[in-house]
Image: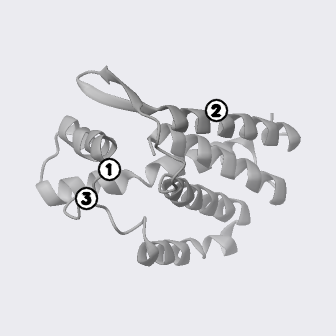
Amino acid sequence: MMPRSHLLFGFLAGAVVSLFVQDITLLHVLAAGVLAVLIDLDHFACHIFKTKDLHVTNIWKRCFNDHYKDHKEDPHYKSRFVHYWPGIIIISVLFAPLFWWRVDIAAIAYAGYYSHILSDNLTKLKFYGNLPPFTFEVRKLLYPVYIDELLFDVFVFAMTLILLLKGGLL
């Protein structure tokens, strides 16, 4: 998924958490969305570690454009830690002590992280990614937009607004 979708899905997860955990504010919900996007920094780190290339254009092309162009699983560039079971378990254990400090922060951290993992796994379902993308260029970087991902984003945004209104955060 593109960062836009992770951000919106993280907002939705934060809005859901706000219905069940006291003291969650709109800032917490926003933090869940930002955390959901920041999880993908491991793709950048993996690229830099493997290639020793710090050029942002090359990182973008490798991490986003190539991924969306052919959906190949390239083990040389594939980030494995935070997106797969060993990493999920380790990250979950690392977040656990947050519950003793502040339940609201822990719940939002888990919401942001698990929303990212869930939304990445949604892209593996057969109904997703079947429609061709339209692509536009920003500063010589291709930015693909899949119609079904855009429809998903609109749905998630609407659900987030409804939950935020229901929870009294808007």
Asked if marks 2 and 3 touch (Cβ < 8 Å), the reply is no
1 vs 3, front mark: 1
Q: Is 159 rendered above or below residue 127?
A: above
**Nearest the eye: 27 or 61:** 61
Q: Which residue is mark 3?
A: 46
* Camera-nearest residue between 160 and 30: 160
Residue lying at the far left of the rendered structure? 52
| Pointer 1 with pointer 3, Cβ within 8 A | no
Above or below, comparing residue 63 to residue 131 in the picture: below
- Distance from disc 2 to disc 3, alpha carbons, whole Å, reads 31 Å
- Residue, disc 1: 71
The residue located at (64%, 44%) in the rendering is: 11
Image quarter for residue 164? Answer: top right
**Picture residue at 61% right of the left edge, 63% below the top:** 110
Q: Residues within 10 Å of mark 1 (few under 14, many from 20)?
A: few
The kind of residue on which mark 3 rests is: Cys
Q: Quadrant of the C terminus?
A: top right
Sequence-earlier tag: 2 or 1: 1
Say which of 74 and 29 sits in front: 74
